[in-house]
Image: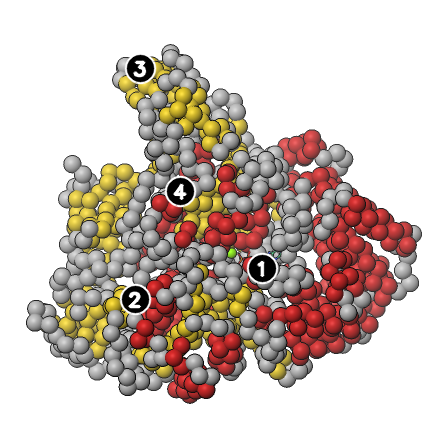
Amino acid sequence: MSTKGKVKGIISNLVTIGVDGPVSQNEICYISLGDEKLMAEVLKVAGDNVYAQVFESTRGLKVGNVVEFAGHMLEVTLGPGLLSRNYDGLQNDLDKLTGVFLKRGEYNYPLDTEKLWQFKPLVQVGDQVEAATWIGEVDENHQPHKIMVPFNMEGVYTVKSIVKAGDYKILDNIAIVTDSEGNEYPLTMVQKWPVKQPINIHVSKPRPFKLLETGVRTIDTANPIVEGGTGFIPGPFGTGKTVLQHAISKQAEADIVIIAACGERANEVVEIFVEFPELEDPHTGRKLMERTIIIANTSNMPVASREASVYTAMTIAEYYRAMGLKVLLMADSTSRWAQALREMSNRMEELPGQDAFPMDLSAIISAFYSRAGFVYLKNKTTGSITFIGTVSPAGGNLKEPVTEGTKKAARCFYALEQARADRKRYPAVNPIDSYSKYIEYPEFEDYIKTKIEGDWIGKVNQMKTILQRGKEVQEQINILGDDGVPVDYHVTFWKSEVIDFVILQQDAFDKIDSVTPLERQEFMLDLVMSICNNEYAFDSFLEVMDYFKKVINACKQMNYSEFRSEKFEKYVAEVKAIIDEKKK
Amino acid sequence: MATKAFQKIYTKIDQITKATCSLKATGISNEELATINGKLAQVVKIMGEDITLQVFGGTEGIPTNAEVIFLGKTPSLKVSDQLAGRFFNAFGDPIDGGPAIEGEEIEIGGPSVNPVRRKQPSELIATGIAGIDLNNTLVSGQKIPFFADPDQPYNQVMANVALRAEADKIILGGMGLTNDDYLYFKNVFNNAGVLDRIVSFMNTTENPPVERLLIPDMALTAAEYFAVEKNQKVLVLLTDMTSYADALAIVSNRMDQIPSKDSMPGSLYSDLAKIYEKAVQFPAGGSITIIAVTTLSGGDITHAIPDNTGYITEGQLFLRRDSDIGKVIVDPFRSLSRLKQLVAGKKTREDHPQVMNAAVRLYADAANAKTKLENGFDLTNYDERTLSFAKDYADQLLAIDVNIDTTKMLDLTWGLFAEHFKPEEVNIKQELVEKYWK
Ligand SMILES: Nc1ncnc2c1ncn2[C@@H]1O[C@H](COP(=O)(O)OP(=O)(O)O)[C@@H](O)[C@H]1O
Ligand SMILES: [Mg+2]
């Protein structure tokens, strides 16, 4: 018999419940209100009182309303058919909901139980299997979706029977396995998993080292992220967090892309709904939507499921990683999730930490980021979850708990800067403050040598040095005046401007400029560095600016032209001619 | 409101603060309305038999033996076509001397639109103001505030925008509006002969501040009626949302909630988002566009109210006095329309995005030159040119008194480019330069 309870108190979406039996922390319960049932999650137990956060509006709730406990934590349903779906934070399929407006208490099954899948067995009768063993495979949008022994089955099992290749529904029995005592366990293509627990079925998690190409120059060239890496994008509003994340999710070389729209604008999700079914994956040529899952819990949707949404997304990511796939997970914005935690913590009158956030915020963030990573699976194959979160610091001040907590957890830092955004220098990633720890890994250096010939990292570091020098010189010019510094200083400054305009700045809305494949990035960095490595003869600082503006203009025209096209080559020649004019 | 026979009357209040009253009662629903000696109040906290109510009219003069009657419903509005042309208070009662509205009674603060049912906004709203149309193009279904210091003419600009926007209905939600501004809006709409398209919900500085909390939801409930039931294009004007947020702070501080930044409640982001996210393009053609005002204190946009707003809305229009030309301009640096790319260059001429960015970049160069000048350095010839460009650009395009169409704006900007610069200095695609350079 499941535990029952009654509502005793209500403050906004925090409900106090008196219970008649055992309840576990984070257990799900349903509060009856007329013919609606409102889902809630236990946050705290104190004697007979249970505190639960309701995933819905609590309007109309009364003392005495009946509560039924579900006996499990918040969990997601995992199986074929997750791809291309649009879920809310609790994994309700938004497309299955009726009506233009969301209806309170309307929940649904996240997968299609009627669809037939072409199942191919991967094990035979008598085989030994354990949690996460691939026992079969179906084709999901042209990707091999592995059917696995449920992750919660401990120990070793023997395959007693497995169906022949053919068409099956997800809830059909496809295999029976037995444990050492001969107990039988029928398996379907579906399993459930509690979202707040990491799925740990891999054998090891080495340091990630393989470049994850994003087509964004300020990332790939300057501060690369890797398969299984973590990164975060903090920035005041309007500096380009969402545009940058959307660009990465469109272009990155990943098998699966999961986007958690966490407490941000609904219209930004609509943009994905509209674009992704039309746009092509630049790596496979198939429609982007085929590899994408969207978890939309926008700012006007219930606050508690905002927190759930990032965990739902991460759990689905872990599920696909266990199939040996390259998963890219994006969350926009993790600050909204932290704020949801803050709202609840305040209502529960917990001792507040800095800025009224919960005391353990930093630990919660770290635990979440640590679920990403590059792993070796038991069958020696690899899988990865690359996680990039945005952070929306209050007042744009990076010295606030969410940014600081995330900085400890994430290995790449893409700091968006108001001043750059104001000047339309997009993407507004500050090239000097931002970093990628991965570029320092020897494993990465070895790996990148297999992709790009020559001393790539040397060139990148040289580029960064020039940017740094350029910034210093600019500060000196600001203090001493244009003619208060040698002409050379102006040359250094303008070389850094060439790097900024040609490599770092990238128009996310231009069809060609928006995506730069690695080969093209290599070409452009070579060209720009050769420009920077030249010595030039100028008589006065006045010539310097005019000259480099011409260089920048010609290079920018290249960025807008198809790589290696006639037009492109024409501008290459033009750049060379301009260089020869003044080269010493 | 008349008392119904079965209603239980309570007459013992245990606790009174500036904005709330607490008493013992049973069978009460969360968010239910009550009257306390005739003053409207709403349940905000239930703990067993202890009920806390937020009193909209303020608690001044409420005695411990006040008569408390629970109404068994949450705040609501009667909706029908009769709303058009009418003026209401925060409770949705007429203040124009006209008759009560007949229509279906709808709970305000209703559910959100399912994101997959939204349509992507795509209809340009032309205002004639280049600081908006050229640099920060507005789109139906957008939500965007003016960020302005209290001495800026934001209500005037907003009224102009509203009149030029070609909306089927304009819904004005006034919060802490001065009586003069209220009369200003009434006059402008009257003179333009559009009163029959206006619905107003008013809370002026003469009304109690907590009542303001109802205004946005009232206005948006009316907006949803016209946009959903009648497929109309509805423009909602909310002025001033800073007064709204201040009222939120009053209530939450009275309820002993731990304030976060700037004494604002920790839920400020969610509270504001629930309002602004009502802006939507419905699939059947109706839309709700929200243009709001968030007054700043000394131009500080890092304060929690503008900061949270900026994270929610689809951009902001920043008004600033430009001392060089002695006019108010739409500041191109701090202003942004996040939906502009849905229409710029698509519904407007192809060169729009590039021209807009190039002009702002050159304007930024002028700002640098100005700093140089202020620091006492010599200016280069380029610096001089950016400065004279900036002056023309501000005067002919950024000033709020401009009223021309977008093509004219683009032509004007190309003209300024040619007057002050060489083609390679503007960084625009070659094809466009060849076609439009004057
Ligand atoms: N790479 C880019 N290229 C061109 N415009 C950009 C770029 N990044 C951002 N923008 C502009 O900045 C606006 C705000 O970007 P957005 O990503 O929504 O900001 P945030 O998520 O940080 O609030 C966009 O609507 C767009 O106009
Ligand atoms: Mg964003």
Can you tell which of label 4 and label 3 is closer to the viewer?
4
Disc 1 and disc 2 in contact, CB within 8 angstroms: no
Q: To which chain does the residue with label 3 belong? A: A
Q: Which residue is mark 3?
A: A180
Compute the Cα span from label 1 to label 3: 62 Å
In the figure, B431 relative to B299: above or below? above
Query: What kind of element bears circle 1?
Result: helix
* A343 left or right, relative to A385: left
**Label 4 CA crowd tier, 10 Å (few <14, some 14–19, many 20+):** many
Q: Which residue is mark 4?
A: A312
Query: What kind of element bears circle 4?
Result: helix
**Color scheme of the displayed model:** secondary structure
| Camera sees residue A523 | yes
Can you tell which of label 1 and label 3 is closer to the viewer?
1
* Circle 4: residue type: Thr
Residue B406 in which image quadrant: bottom right
**What is the quadrant of the N terminus of chain B in the image?**
bottom left
* Circle 1: residue type: Gln
Q: Earlier in the sequence, mark 4 or mark 3?
A: 3
| Camera sees residue A356 | no
Q: Which residue is mark 1?
A: B341
Nearest the viewer among A49 and A224 is A224
Q: To which chain does the residue with label 2 belong? A: B
**Residue found 17% across the figure and 44% down from its top:** A4
